[in-house]
Image (cartoon, rainbow, N blue to C red):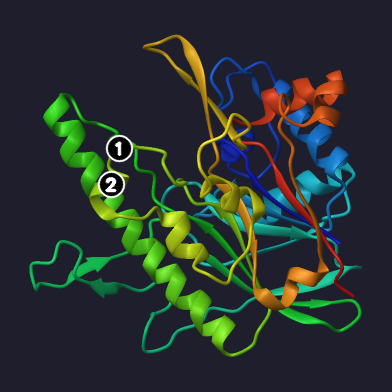
């Protein structure tokens, strides 16, 4: 079985108010890429991956008029891919939902939100002291993680969590002091979300349930100087000692020249691209023996992706993130 986590930059911009694809020369949500080019590129990427399930981060919007499920199931039919059924959880106000596309011949998935004494449901509020002032802060997810109960065609049961943690970027800051203040505040909130997610992971692992956590954590060890103020990155908190993702574990080692990355962004100030590992597929201990191969479909770091010019160009046009896949034996 192939499971994929894929952040599709502003997927919502490709759909009208009736959830119909708009494939024209108008701008997409990707800078310098029109809607036709991004849409066709996504088809090529999805077909090349041939996944059994895809956790879509920044999925199309759900609102008064629009439906994430309708949009993605329509896209699947148009693209001719197997992941033709879609499930999502709590909608949010950002027009960037989290949804799972899956092949119903291989598995079934249903929304299964959890709560316990340590961690409320992800659409609720976590009360936690973020700045050690003995006062509880109230933390919410702008994009509540998607919790799923999954049953394979062979009857195996496991849980999936799709997550998109808060960005640390100081959007809106107008001077250096504002950048510092906002960066620290954003990282503090992101770490609180990571702790919340970690508590849910511990509940699953301690009860002996198989769990896979997928998505964009907007963080990785050593990505910025503010991490030193808090001691650990969000990724280290979420992963803990039990969850495994070889790309994340690689970042915990002394710096090497071959650091993996799953995203590529343009810095207008320096006129250069920079890279970061933000996307992960983490598995609980009971699944490690079944996990066969992790892969980042990076057009410049994965040899097969680079050698396939059509796929290489499609990956660059489709999103500023690249898919992360896990091939795993699940029957």
In the image, farthest residue toward the front:
254
Q: Circle 2 sits in a helix, a strand or a loop, which is it?
A: helix
Q: Circle 1 sits in a helix, a strand or a loop, which is it?
A: loop
- Tell me residue 42's x, y (percent): 75, 34
Q: Can residue 6 be seen in this view?
A: yes
- Tell me residue 241's x, y (percent): 52, 70
Q: 41 above or below 267?
A: below
**Residue ID at (61%, 38%):** 262
Q: Is residue 289 left or right of residue 180?
A: right
Location of residue 290 (image quadrant): bottom right
**Residue ID at (76%, 28%):** 41
Location of residue 204 (image quadrant): bottom right
Locate the N terminus by quadrant.
bottom right
**Residue ID at (80%, 71%):** 289
Residue in the foreground of this view, choosing between 305 and 79: 305
Badge 2 is on which residue? 228
Residue in the foreground of this view, choosing between 233 and 310: 233
Give the label on residue 194, or none: none
- Tell me residue 294's x, y (percent): 75, 51
Q: 305 above or below 128?
A: above
Badge 1 is on which residue? 225
Q: Tally the numbered discs.
A: 2
Q: Are marks 1 and 2 in contact (CB under 8 Å)?
A: yes
Q: 13 above or below 212?
A: above
Could you give the CA–CA distance between mark 1 and mark 2, rounded to whole angstroms? Answer: 6 Å
In the image, farthest residue toward the top:
271
Crowding at dot 1, Cα within 10 Å, few <14 / some 14-19 / many 20+, comes out as: few
Q: Can residue 57 be seen in this view?
A: no
Residue in the foreground of this view, choosing between 87 and 261: 261
Q: In this view, does 42 lie to the left or right of 143?
A: right
- Tell me residue 97's x, y (percent): 54, 53
């Amino acid at each position: 079985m192939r499971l994929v986590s894929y952040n599709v930059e502003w997927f919502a911009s490709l759909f009208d108010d009736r959830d119909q694809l708009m494939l024209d020369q108008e701008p997409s949500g990707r800078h310098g890429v029109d809607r036709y080019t991004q849409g066709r590129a996504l088809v090529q990427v999805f077909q090349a991956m041939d996944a059994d399930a895809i956790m879509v981060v920044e999925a199309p919007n759900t609102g008064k008029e629009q439906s994430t499920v309708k949009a993605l199931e329509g896209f699947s039919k148009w693209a001719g891919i197997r992941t033709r059924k879609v499930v999502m959880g709590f909608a949010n106000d950002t027009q960037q939902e989290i949804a799972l596309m899956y092949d119903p011949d291989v598995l079934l998935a249903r929304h299964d939100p959890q709560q316990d004494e340590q961690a409320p449901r992800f659409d609720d509020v976590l009360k936690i002291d973020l700045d050690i002032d003995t006062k509880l802060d109230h933390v919410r997810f702008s994009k509540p993680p998607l919790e799923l109960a999954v049953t394979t065609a062979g009857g195996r049961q496991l849980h999936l969590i799709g997550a998109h943690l808060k960005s640390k970027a100081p959007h809106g800051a107008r001077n250096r002091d504002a950048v510092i203040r906002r960066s620290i505040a954003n990282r503090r909130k992101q770490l609180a979300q990571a702790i919340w997610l970690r508590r849910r992971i511990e509940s699953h692992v301690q009860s002996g349930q198989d769990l896979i956590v997928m998505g964009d954590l907007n963080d990785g060890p050593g990505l910025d100087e503010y991490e030193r103020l808090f001691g650990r990155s969000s990724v280290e908190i979420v992963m803990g000692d039990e969850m495994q993702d070889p790309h994340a574990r690689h970042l915990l080692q002394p710096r090497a020249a071959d650091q993996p990355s799953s995203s590529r962004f343009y810095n207008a100030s320096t006129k250069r691209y920079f890279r970061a590992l933000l996307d992960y597929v983490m598995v609980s201990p009971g699944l490690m023996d079944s996990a066969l191969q992790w892969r980042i479909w990076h057009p410049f770091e994965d040899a097969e992706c680079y050698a396939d010019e059509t796929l290489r160009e499609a990956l660059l046009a489709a999103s500023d993130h690249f898919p992360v896949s896990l091939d795993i034996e699940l029957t």
